[in-house]
């Protein structure tokens, strides 16, 4: 009796309910059919994307390569993707799979001017346990290394763009060639900086302390030069680009404007840190450094973009958080020579104010303090840490004499291996100074200054572009792979483009 009542109730259901039941059953059938169809096909590679490689295409930090497939990867293979995707030349890094994509993050910068081949094995299985229909190959090439440097022209300077090119191998040793292009000439060029995220540089031109600094923008791809119109009249020193692409610099009012200020207004308008957005034209004071206003000589952004090193006129070097403004003094240092690409180590040169017979030591400083230091009997300067985080370069005085007459050699050590010596080079009658590692660490640029002209200039005069610079400094690049020096030509103040 009860069974008959249940059947009667089912037949009395409204057409609307029957329609929904039929629809649900139809959707289930379609899903099962779709699963059956897709499981019978094969996984395919549909896209490869290179990210974090700037428009210059040069070797970049944190290079990422993303592979997109038609299906998700098998969960069983997520820990062994490297067995199925390979690079030639080899690239160290980490694979990560999310849904239908696999992302490879390189552990360091790629080699310049090099063609890479990616091979994907057909045995790479999808979430249904099925291999690919066929393997896949993909090729890409990094661009040449590039650098800026200055040359003398009568009373003014030229700005040159250099490129390091790989040539056909000769006896299994790749040949290297230098090409140069002049991008600015016959100007009183002072300083220049390169954007990390866009193919652009800026350079400053000073036409007297009474007038504000002229700032020029140069596009490295199109070759177009544009003069920037800052909304405030400023003399600009120590320009650098932040990780986010803004121009950072120390700004001071020109002398003719400072002369019109009351004495109590001078500290508020002297040596202030600014940021300038080239695209929007917005100029701002760097408020995170407000507690150091009027006392900053240089700033150096850390690779994470959240911290800057501030150097004060009393030689204090202070890391400052741009997020909170918090700071903790690192010590008194005459100069700092760049971060490694992780941003956790920095090269510095210690200083002693008023101490007689003082031998300045070059050091590598980390978050926990000193990591490496040169010996006390060595007179060092020009510290420079390699981006890839092992090598440390500095100049070493070769003779006991006045600083302006000193001849310096070049030394490179592995500071993570107890200071193991990698290079110790000197030339008679030459002083080797201001060494700078290329972005991926394959080269080390240095200035070779004839000892005969050192008597006429001071060390400070050699750091910045001014009429006191020697006209016969020679720029050379040391090739670590081939253990040889490559001549660039006359020039100074080299800046590698990252």
Image (cartoon, grey):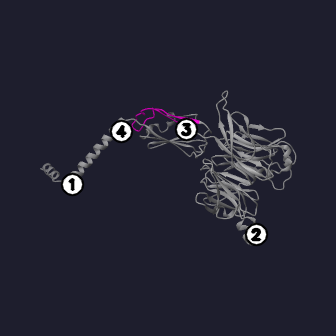
Look at mark 1 in the image and give the residue it sits on: 16
In x, y percent, where is residue 110? 60, 40
In x, y percent, where is residue 160? 70, 46
Point 76% across, 69% down: residue: 259
From this viewpoint, which residue is outermost toward the right? Answer: 401
Element at label 1: helix
Look at mark 4 in the image and give the residue it sits on: 38
Among the two numbered marks 2 and 1 on one chain, the one whose residue lies closer to the N terminus: 1
Disc 2 versus disc 1: distance between alpha carbons?
A: 88 Å
> Of residues 49 and 163, which is closer to you in this image?
163
Element at label 3: strand
Disc 1 versus disc 3: distance between alpha carbons?
A: 59 Å
Q: Which residues are magenta?
A: 115-140
Label 1 crowding class (10 Å Cα cut-off): few <14, some 14-19, many 20+? few
Disc 3 versus disc 2: distance between alpha carbons?
A: 57 Å
> Of residues 318 and 477, which is closer to you in this image?
477
> Of residues 491 and 24, which is closer to you in this image?
491
């Amino acid at each position: 009796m009860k069974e008959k009542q249940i059947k009667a109730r089912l037949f009395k259901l409204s057409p609307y309910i029957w329609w929904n039941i039929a629809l649900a059953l139809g959707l289930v059938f379609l899903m099962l059919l779709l699963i059956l169809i897709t499981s019978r096909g094969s996984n395919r590679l549909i896209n490869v994307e290179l990210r974090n490689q700037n428009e210059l295409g040069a070797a970049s930090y944190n290079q990422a390569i993303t592979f997109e497939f038609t299906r998700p990867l098998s969960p069983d293979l997520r820990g062994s993707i490297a067995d199925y995707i390979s690079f030639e030349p080899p690239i160290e890094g980490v694979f990560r799979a999310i849904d239908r994509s696999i992302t490879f993050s390189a552990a360091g910068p790629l080699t310049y001017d090099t063609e890479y081949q990616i091979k994907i094995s057909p045995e790479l299985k999808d979430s249904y346990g099925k291999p690919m229909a066929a393997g896949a190959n993909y090729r890409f090439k990094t661009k040449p290394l590039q650098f800026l440097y200055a040359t003398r022209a009568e009373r003014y300077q030229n700005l040159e763009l250099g490129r390091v090119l790989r040539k056909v191998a000769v006896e299994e040793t790749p040949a290297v060639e230098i090409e140069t292009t002049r991008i600015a000439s016959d100007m009183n060029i002072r300083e220049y900086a390169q954007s990390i995220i866009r193919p652009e540089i800026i350079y400053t031109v000073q036409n007297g302390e009474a007038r504000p600094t002229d700032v020029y923008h140069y596009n490295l791809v199109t070759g177009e030069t544009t003069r920037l119109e800052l909304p405030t009249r400023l003399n600009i020193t120590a320009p650098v680009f932040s990780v986010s692409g803004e121009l950072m610099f120390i700004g001071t009012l020109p002398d003719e404007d400072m002369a019109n200020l009351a004495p109590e207004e001078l500290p508020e308008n002297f040596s202030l840190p600014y940021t300038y957005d080239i695209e929007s034209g917005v100029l701002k004071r760097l408020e995170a450094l407000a507690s150091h206003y009027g006392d900053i000589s240089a700033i150096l952004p850390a690779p994470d973009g959240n911290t800057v090193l501030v150097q004060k006129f009393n030689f204090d070097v202070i890391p400052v958080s741009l997020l909170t403004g918090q700071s903790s003094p690192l010590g008194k240092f005459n100069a700092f020579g760049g971060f490694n690409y992780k941003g956790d180590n920095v090269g510095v040169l210690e200083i002693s104010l008023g101490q007689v017979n003082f031998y300045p030591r070059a050091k590598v400083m980390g978050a926990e303090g000193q990591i490496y230091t040169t010996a006390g009997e060595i007179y060092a300067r020009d510290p420079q840490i390699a981006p890839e985080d092992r090598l440390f370069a500095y100049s070493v005085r070769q003779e006991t004499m006045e600083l302006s007459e000193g001849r310096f050699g070049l030394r490179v050590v592995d500071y993570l291996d107890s200071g193991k010596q990698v290079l110790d080079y000197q030339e008679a009658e030459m002083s080797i100074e201001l060494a700078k590692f290329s972005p991926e660490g394959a080269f080390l640029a240095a200035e070779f200054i004839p000892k005969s002209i050192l008597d006429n200039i001071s060390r400070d005069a050699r750091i910045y572009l001014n009429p006191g610079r020697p006209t016969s400094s020679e720029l050379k690049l040391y090739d670590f792979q081939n253990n040889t020096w490559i001549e660039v030509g006359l020039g100074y103040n080299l800046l590698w483009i990252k």
